[in-house]
Image (cartoon, helix red, strand yellow):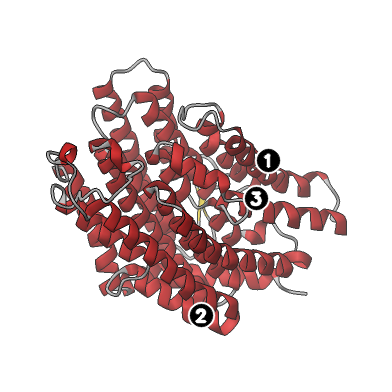
């Protein structure tokens, strides 16, 4: 890499976050700063991904900061995350979104990007802390009072830090190896929200600002940790650790689908569905089968786009009527907002693998690959998918069907910037679903890279 795309992209996000968090800027200027920062970051991430996927090197290091490097595994998710950040800032409310909220959003993005491009375990750990900093220091007023959420986030980041530090300060004894295994499983389970450690993520979705919570979720740092486990786990313990993670993820996917039956609030239902789908992605990555890994990588992309879209629709509804937070009866919002209803349905169906979308291709590869290598995933995946379909359709009918309340009769449908942005998301999911070779061009080599890494780890 001859140009410092990664350093410039990270500096754009970090500088934008610092300016916005200083609270010395007006709302109109704040939006300009946020759009400019995310736009520059996306351009750099896209250019870096293009360079990395066209290179034969395992790591393509940044010329300004060698501890930043691009690799084929994270290239596409990293560029996609930059695009999602830009779109989220663009469609955010021009009245309700405060400068400090945009600053916290950019801070999460800068930490996530640091983790994605980390060429050293300590840089990876620093990225975990930075992306969680807004939650820990109370920038998110809605969840600041929930000590259990903060506590679990601190434990996850601490586990990641110890995972990076322990091999540097302790001899490679059997006790240290098993300590690394425990830290690895704890960091993955907490950061990903695997049962029974999912409470902080569900609580954050329920009480927190969805714009930032969704970015924190879509960072998917636990997936990145498993994909790069070669750099963190000793050879002797890799096999049992990955098997434990795969089993935990399979069970978490199914349990989250069952647990959502007890929920009615749209935020909590959607949170459980997203946790369930992301657990399936994690299980596919940890399974070690090339088809399952490729399917998991594609589902990673589909999950990022569909979850951002469905949460954007929910945010739009909550901005229009307070009854969308906790509906007691069917709201009938499909009458005044039919476009939002269609967008919600498309994103929900894409999450569960609607034929013709990227989710269908991804789940098909994941299912058939899992059957060959890890039959438990082949059983839990279709069951969890069926349960998630029930929950998404139940939430869709709750929000958009029924008799329209009189107080909601004049709510506006999707605004122009919302229609264009959500339309791009839909086009992404459908085009890659109908022409999957575009995505497989990245997913195939990335899956080979992940599988070779895991194969090296499982040498006895």
Front residue of 457/60: it is 457
Q: Secondary structure at mark 3?
A: helix
Q: Is residue 304 visible?
A: yes
Q: Is residue 445 visible?
A: no
Residue 66: which quarter of the image? top right
Q: Residue furthest bottom?
A: 372
Q: Are marks 1 and 3 in contact (CB under 8 Å)?
A: no
Residue in the image at 71% along x and 48% along y: 163
Decide: few, some or many residues near mark 2? Use Cα within 10 Å; few <14, some 14-19, many ≥20.
many
Residue 406: which quarter of the image? top left
Image coordinates for residue 334, horizontal then vertical, percent: 18, 52
Seen in the image, is 237 located left or right of residue 217? right
Q: CA distance from mark 2 to mark 1?
A: 34 Å
From the image, tell me which residue sits under label 2: 369
Q: Are marks 2 and 1 in contact (CB under 8 Å)?
A: no
From the image, tell me which residue sits under label 3: 187
Image coordinates for residue 413, horizontal then vertical, percent: 15, 45
Q: CA distance from mark 3 to mark 2?
A: 26 Å
Residue in the image at 41% along x and 40% along y: 9
């Amino acid at each position: 890499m001859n140009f410092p795309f990664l350093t410039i992209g990270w500096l754009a996000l970090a500088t934008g976050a610092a300016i916005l968090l200083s609270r010395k800027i007006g709302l109109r200027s704040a939006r300009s700063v946020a759009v400019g920062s995310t736009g520059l970051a996306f351009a750099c991430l896209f250019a870096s991904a293009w360079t990395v996927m066209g290179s034969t090197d395992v790591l393509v290091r940044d010329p300004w900061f060698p501890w930043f490097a691009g690799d084929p595994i994270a290239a596409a998710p990293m560029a996609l995350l930059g695009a999602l950040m830009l779109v989220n800032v663009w469609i955010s409310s021009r009245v309700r979104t405060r400068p400090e909220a945009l600053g916290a959003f950019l801070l999460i993005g800068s930490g996530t990007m640091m983790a994605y491009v980390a060429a050293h375990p300590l840089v990876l750990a620093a990225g975990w802390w930075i992306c969680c900093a807004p939650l820990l220091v109370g920038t998110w007023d809605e969840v600041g009072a929930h000590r259990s959420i903060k506590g679990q986030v601190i434990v996850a980041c601490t586990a990641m830090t110890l995972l990076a530090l322990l091999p540097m300060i302790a001899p490679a004894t059997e006790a240290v190896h098993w300590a690394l295994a425990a830290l690895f499983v704890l960091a993955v389970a907490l950061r990903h929200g695997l049962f029974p450690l999912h409470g902080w993520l569900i609580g954050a979705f329920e009480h927190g600002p969805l714009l930032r919570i969704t970015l924190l979720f879509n960072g998917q740092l636990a997936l990145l940790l498993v994909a790069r486990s070669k750099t963190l786990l000793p050879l002797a313990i890799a096999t049992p650790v990955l098997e434990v993670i795969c089993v935990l993820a399979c069970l978490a996917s199914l349990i989250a689908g069952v647990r959502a039956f007890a929920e009615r609030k749209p935020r909590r239902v959607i949170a459980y569905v997203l946790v369930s789908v992301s657990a399936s992605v994690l299980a596919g990555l940890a399974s070690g089968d090339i088809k399952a890994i490729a399917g998991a990588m594609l589902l990673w992309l589909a999950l990022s786009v569909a979850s951002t879209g469905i949460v954007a629709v929910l945010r739009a509804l909550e901005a229009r009527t307070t009854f969308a937070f906790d509906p007691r009866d069917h709201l009938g919002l499909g009458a005044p907002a039919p476009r939002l209803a269609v967008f919600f349905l498309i994103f929900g169906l894409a999450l569960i693998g609607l034929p013709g979308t990227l989710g269908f291709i991804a789940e098909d590869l994941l299912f058939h690959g899992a059957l060959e290598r890890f039959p438990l995933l082949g059983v839990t995946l279709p069951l969890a998918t069926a349960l998630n379909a029930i929950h998404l359709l139940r939430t869709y009918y709750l929000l958009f069907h029924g008799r329209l309340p009189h107080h909601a009769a004049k709510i506006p449908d999707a605004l122009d910037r919302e229609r264009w942005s959500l339309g791009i998301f839909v086009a992404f999911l459908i085009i890659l679903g109908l022409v999957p070779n575009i995505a497989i061009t990245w997913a195939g080599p990335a899956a080979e890279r992940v599988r070779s890494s895991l194969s090296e780890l499982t040498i006895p």
